[in-house]
Amino acid sequence: MKKILAALVTAGLLIMGTASFAQFRKIPSVVTDAFKAKYPNANAVEWKDKLRVFQADFEMKDDDYQARFNSKGEWQETEKNIEQDKLPAEVSDGFAKSKFSEWEIKEVSYIEKKDGSDLYRILVRKNDIEKKYLFFDKSGKLTRNSITL
């Protein structure tokens, strides 16, 4: 039993060690140029390769943002955390009328999308185990919900 456990631990450490040396793509200049053009006043920019998109985490006017661009430099969406009291009345009303209205709100984000279908994402928690992301459109309609990990 000890040999099996030792082998599993060793394998896990090897996997974690090799993952830390994995090569990530360089952020293409077409992506960074598109970002600079869209957000010329951005500060503290940090890039992440999310495989399907490149994500820029940045600050602007004392707010934190995440902008996502495809490999061609085309902007896809931008997300900004907002305070719950900054939700539009329609979205607050939609949440209040939803079956999740008794759940605790943990985080609220505004997501501006390329196609104009902007969303408000609300992270809610019922207990330490049950958490969901709720997505509302501008009119306050709950468009989808998903389980968080």
Image (spheres, rainbow, N blue to C red):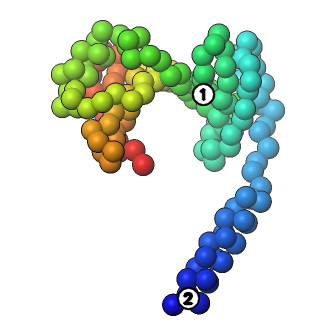
Q: Quadrant of residue 17?
A: bottom right
Q: Quadrant of residue 75?
A: top right
Q: Please, which residue is most extreme toward the front here? A: 2
Q: Is residue 149 above or below residue 116?
A: below
**Amino acid tagged 1:** Gln
Mark 2, Cα crowd under 10 Å, few <14 / some 14-19 / many 20+, is: few
Which of these two is toward me, 63 or 2?
2
Q: Name the disc covering residue 2, or none.
A: 2
Q: Name the disc covering residue 34, or none.
A: none
Left or right placement of residue 36 versus residue 121 in this view: right
Number of labels in the image equals 2
Q: Residue at x 47, y 18 (%)?
A: 82
Provide the secondary structure element on which disc 2 rests.
Answer: helix
Return the x and y of residue 119 as percentages of the image width and height: 41, 23
Return the x and y of residue 20 as percentages of the image width and height: 73, 58
Return the x and y of residue 28 as percentages of the image width and height: 78, 37
Which residue in the protein does label 1 denote? 66
Which of these two is toward me, 83 or 21?
83
What is the CA distance from the residue labelled 1 to the residue labelled 2?
46 Å
Left or right placement of residue 75 versus residue 40 in this view: left
Left or right placement of residue 33 versus residue 135 in this view: right
Q: Is residue 134 visible?
A: no
Q: Residue at x 67, y 65 (%)?
A: 16
Which one is earlier in the sequence, the residue at label 1 or at label 2? 2
Q: Is residue 16 above or below residue 52?
A: below
**Amino acid tagged 2:** Lys
Q: Residue at x 74, y 14 (%)?
A: 40
Q: Between tags 1 and 2, which lies in front?
A: 2
Return the x and y of residue 124 as percentages of the image width and height: 33, 33
Q: Is residue 141 above or below residue 41?
A: below
